[in-house]
Every structure is written in structure tokens, then in C-alpha cells.
Amino acid sequence: MPLSRRLYRLQTRLALTGPEAMALLVLAGALALGLGVRQLQGRAAPPAAHLAAADATWAALDAAARTPTPDVAPAAGSDGAPASEAGLAPADSVAIPTAGFADPPRARRGAVGGPVRMNLNTADAALLQRLPRIGPALASRIIAYRQEVGPFRRVEDVVNVRGIGPKTLEDIRPWLYVE
């Protein structure tokens, strides 16, 4: 018996309309396709030894990038030849790609750590730059405002500095106090 006839009998037994039968057929096809893809993905997994070798390679590159070696002789390859002849690059010449990676959050860029609580009237430019959304330009404007107008009486007065609005104030308020 042809498949179309079997499907028609199933449709009449379940009392399905044409669109309901089509929807059921599409769902069954999607389920079958998903199971097939899952089976193929399970078979295409690389062997565990390959993953361990890749992890070891990345760990060695990471260690080499962190270790300064300007006065150390190049490592030798497995056959005793210098690293450059063995096809390996010395640790100090490993290129680390940076293109395509996201920039670090604004609060940490150029700073040793994250924001810290600070007195708005005594903080220097480097300390002010540790605040979220505050870069070198805004830090210098805050310092210039303090020199021209005098010390801030309240933390909220920082909105008088050009470039600092209510949104920036809300982001930096937890880190500021005035004495």
C-alpha cells in the first residue's frame, strides 16, 4: 500500500482536517530531522586525545606569553636542533591575535582595578578614570571644574561638568562622596 494511502487512512482515523494533518506531518518531519542531526553530531566529535593535545598546546602558548624570556637561549626541538629549525617559534616571538576581540569594560580600561570609593574633591585624574564611563577627558574636566569653581558641595553637583548627565551620575554615584 502506498505511503499516501496510509497517511490518508491515519488522517481519517484520527479525524484530522487537512491543515491539522499537514501540521502533524511537518512536526514529525522536524523531529526526525533533529534526531538525525543529533546522531551525526555525536559521530563527528573529535577523539579525546586530539582535545587533550589542543589543550596542552594552548596552555603552553599561554605560559610562554606570560613568561618574559629576553635573555634565555631558544629552546631546542626534539631532535636537538634549535627551535627555529625544528619548526617551533621561541616563546618571545609568539604572536597573540587581538583583532576581533571585544574591548574590556570601560571601568577597567587603563586602570589597575575596578572602581573604588573616592572623595570627589581630592581624587586625581588616574583615580577618577577608574569610575565607570569616566575617561581621561571627563577626568580632566572634573579637575578643571574644581579649580575654577571650587570644591563640590554635593555629589550631585558633578552634573555641572560638561559631559556628565543624569545617566553617568547614576553610574558613578555609589563610588563618590564629598567631604
Image (cartoon, rainbow, N blue to C red):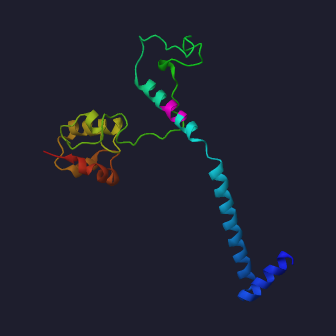
Pinpoint residue 119: horizontal percent, then vertical percent. Answer: 18, 42
> Along the line of sight, which residue is nearer the eye, 159 or 77?
77
Q: Is residue 78 above or below residue 125?
A: above
Q: Is residue 31 above or below residue 165?
A: below
Pinpoint residue 17: horizontal percent, then vertical percent. Answer: 74, 86
Q: Please give the range of residues in magenta.
A: 53-58
Is 54 left, or right, of 114 in this rendering?
Answer: right
Q: Is residue 65 above or below residue 33?
A: above
> Along the line of sight, which residue is nearer the eye, 111 or 146?
111
- In magenta segment, residue 51: no
Residue positioned 56% across, 37% down in the render? 49
Residue positioned 83% across, 77% down in the render? 4
Pinpoint residue 18: horizontal percent, then vertical percent. Answer: 76, 83
- In magenta segment, residue 55: yes
Quadrant of the snapshot with the N terminus: bottom right
Count of numbered tags: 0
Q: Quadrant of residue 79?
A: top right
| Main secondary structure along the magenta-highlighted residues | helix
Residue positioned 39% across, 43% down in the render? 105
Is 69 left, or right, of 130 in this rendering?
Answer: right
Is 67 left, or right, of 112 in this rendering?
Answer: right
Residue most toward the left? 179
> Along the line of sight, which residue is nearer the eye, 75 or 161?
75
